[in-house]
């Protein structure tokens, strides 16, 4: 915001009061005659753990204004006041998604660096303690967002955000979601599918399983996935339950190949979406619509 559009202390107090009353950003913006984006940026930049405080926001705005006065070359790290403001604003947006605020500042600083930075560089640029940087780096490494490099011939460590950081972070999340789904399915077997705990765990397994499937990319790339679609087509064409041996005979495949295709559908249900393969006997299978694709009311209104 420039001086002409900068929020006043009184406006910040009004924002805090209206947020406490439960008003949304659009309504607050309408009452103040401001763009909604101005309010959302203000809260993201100055909110802490979802709590917006007018006094804190006013003090932070004052500090940012003072930083703008020196020339670009006068900043200790060579950055302009606007660049420092961007780090603060972007970090605020990341913090609003759940990332600790200090960690978000460290990540944004690394994200916008021309190269790698040492812990000392981060301490100097962010004007924070070494302990804060160390804790933030550990958090970011755990999320696969930051890579650590040791300077050749020296023990000093450098930190950087790799070009493929989002792919690696995505893969980390996908693996975690898949493990949650698998463990939840184990819980269904442990507590029983008909118990309250079993039903909750089954819903959780289904949710995280589908999330993992969609985040993991195309399931068709998995070995035996093409066979899985052929088996699915065979069940749909037959229109009745089929034994594994009967499918193997009809398709002209070894039993092991049919079993492997069925295992893919069991492990990656998205292969068969919007259908599902159900085991009705130890080696007999049928096909049905995925129950989560239709609500109970929709199912009741459709002929069955």
Image (cartoon, helix red, strand yellow):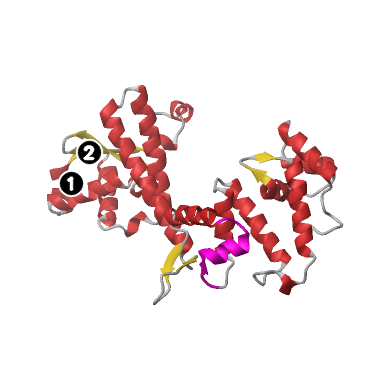
Q: Secondary structure at mark 1?
A: helix
Looking at the rendered image, the quarter that the C terminus falls into is top left
Left or right? Give the position of 95 relative to 295: right
Q: Position of residue 254 (x, y in %)?
A: 12, 53
Residue at numbered disc 1: 247
User: Which residue is rendered at x = 74% and y = 46% of the image?
Assistant: 57
Residue 167: image quadrant is bottom left
Which span is picked out in magenta? 115-129
- The extreme bottom residue here reads 153
Question: 221 and 5: which one is in front?
Answer: 5
* Label 1 Cα crowd, 10 Å radius (few <14 / some 14-19 / many 20+): many
Question: 149 and 220: which one is in front?
Answer: 149
Question: 238 and 115: which one is in front?
Answer: 115
- The extreme top residue here reads 195
In the figure, 34 relative to 294: above or below?
below
Question: 201 and 67: which one is in front?
Answer: 67
For the residues labelled 2 and 1, the Cα–Cα distance comes to 10 Å
* Label 2 Cα crowd, 10 Å radius (few <14 / some 14-19 / many 20+): some
- The extreme right residue here reads 4
Q: Are marks 2 and 1 in contact (CB under 8 Å)?
A: yes
Residue 114: image quadrant is bottom right
Q: Position of residue 288 (x, y in %)?
A: 33, 37
Is residue 111 visible in the rendered image? The answer is no
Determine which of the numbered discs, if any, sits on residue 285 in the image: 2
């Amino acid at each position: 915001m420039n001086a002409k559009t900068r929020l006043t202390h009184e406006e910040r107090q009004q924002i805090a009061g209206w947020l406490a009353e439960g008003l949304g950003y659009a309504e607050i913006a309408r009452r103040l005659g401001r763009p909604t984006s101005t309010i959302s940026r203000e809260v993201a930049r100055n909110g802490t753990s979802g709590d917006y405080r007018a006094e804190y926001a006013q003090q932070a705005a004052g500090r940012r204004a003072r930083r703008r006065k020196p020339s670009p070359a006068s900043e200790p790290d060579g950055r302009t006041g606007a660049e420092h403001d961007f780090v603060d604003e972007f970090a605020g947006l990341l913090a609003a998604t759940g990332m600790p605020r200090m960690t978000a500042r460290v990540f944004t600083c690394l994200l916008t660096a021309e190269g790698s930075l040492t812990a000392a560089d981060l301490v100097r640029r962010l004007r924070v303690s070494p302990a804060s940087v160390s804790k933030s780096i550990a958090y970011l490494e755990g999320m696969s967002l930051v890579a650590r490099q040791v300077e050749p011939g020296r023990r000093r460590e450098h930190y950087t955000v790799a070009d493929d950081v989002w792919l690696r972070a995505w893969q980390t999340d996908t693996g975690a979601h898949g493990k949650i789904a698998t463990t939840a399915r184990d819980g269904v077997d442990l507590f029983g599918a008909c118990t309250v705990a079993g039903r909750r765990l089954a819903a959780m397994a289904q949710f995280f399983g589908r999330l993992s499937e969609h985040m993991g990319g195309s399931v068709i790339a998995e070995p035996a996935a093409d066979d899985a679609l052929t088996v699915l087509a065979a069940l749909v064409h037959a229109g009745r339950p089929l034994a594994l041996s009967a499918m193997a005979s009809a398709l002209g495949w070894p039993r092991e190949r049919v079993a492997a295709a069925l295992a893919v559908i069991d492990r990656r249900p998205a292969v068969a979406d919007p259908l599902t393969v159900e085991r009705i006997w130890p080696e007999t299978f049928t096909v049905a619509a995925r129950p989560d694709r239709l609500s109970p009311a929709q199912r009741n209104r459709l002929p069955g």
